[in-house]
Amino acid sequence: MAYFVSLIKGNLILLPIQKGYFTFKQFAVKQEQTTLKVCTESCLFGALIDLVKAKTVLDIGTGTGLLPLMLAQKFPDAHFTALEIDPAATEEANFNFENSPWGNRLSAIEGNVIDYQPVNLFDVIICNPPFFPDHLLGPDPKKNAALHTTSLSFKELAFSVNRLSLENASFWCLLPSYQMTQLSEELAAFGWFPLQQFFIHNSLEKPVFRVVSQFIRGNSFTQPSSTTLSIRNSQNEYTPEFTALLQPYYLHL
């Protein structure tokens, strides 16, 4: 059996790499109950997010808890609240948090962001929201909630981000290009505009398939910075840019 080393409660512990887990260098993600599994684009999203000096972070729709785990590894002063509408996913996220080196800074809460009433507002909000339109619904209700805009529209998401953020907060989001444009229009109605954008290709020969954007409250006339990232090169190998971003996390980079 293969093992990886984790630091839990101040002790280095050898943990087995198990079936049903996605194993990183410093933590493992159990993903048996969660509809959406760990994927390359979500890992890249987590590696791109910069919390700067943020102390409080809200993850809307945390799933397995992947993003808070990645960010807790990178930003030791931040505390994370992970909101999840699916009870089984919430339970699994809390399991992943408790079995990570940073359990004291991570908590998952079951609930809908529309109804969520926190004690304090947040420095940063992150989200990889559902983005398929309702007419593409499949037979699995749990997968529909995770993938489709039935449980959280972009208008509701923009309203929630504005409601739950401190004055100088930022919002990070991952979406396909067209849906990012739609969300940007909803956020603009509340005075939120992109500060920086990352246009992600599977390879440079292929079109953009995801966009990562950081939004802040501010001036609509400010041109956001723009970065193009390719996951693989023409030889189907990870690019140096992707490798540099994911090397702190992936076991075999």
Image (spheres, rainbow, N blue to C red):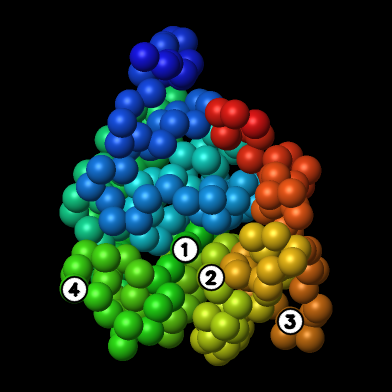
* CB-based contact (under 8 Å), mark 2 and mark 1: yes
The residue most toward the front is 235
Mark 2 vs 1, N-terminal side = 1
**Distance of label 2 from label 1 (alpha carbons):** 7 Å
Callout 4: helix, strand or loop? loop
Which mark is drawn over residue 139? 4
Distance of label 4 from label 1 (alpha carbons): 22 Å
In front of the other: 105 or 22: 22
For the residues marked 2 and 3, what is the alpha-carbon distance in whole angstroms? 22 Å
Q: Earlier in the sequence, mark 1 or mark 3?
A: 1
Please name which of the two marks, 4 or 3, marks the residue nearer to the observer: 4
Above/below status of 194 relative to 182: above
Contact? badges 4 and 2 (CB < 8 Å) = no
Q: Amino acid at mark 2?
A: Leu
Q: Earlier in the sequence, mark 4 or mark 1?
A: 1
**Residue located 35% across and 79% down the image:** 149
Q: Is 204 left or right of 141, judged from the image as shown?
A: right
- The secondary element bearing badge 1 is classed as loop
Residue 128, label in figure: 1
Does residue 56 appear left or right of residue 95 in this picture?
Answer: right
Q: Secondary structure at mark 2?
A: strand
Question: Is 179 on the left-hand or right-hand side of 20?
Answer: right
Which residue is the site of mark 2? 175
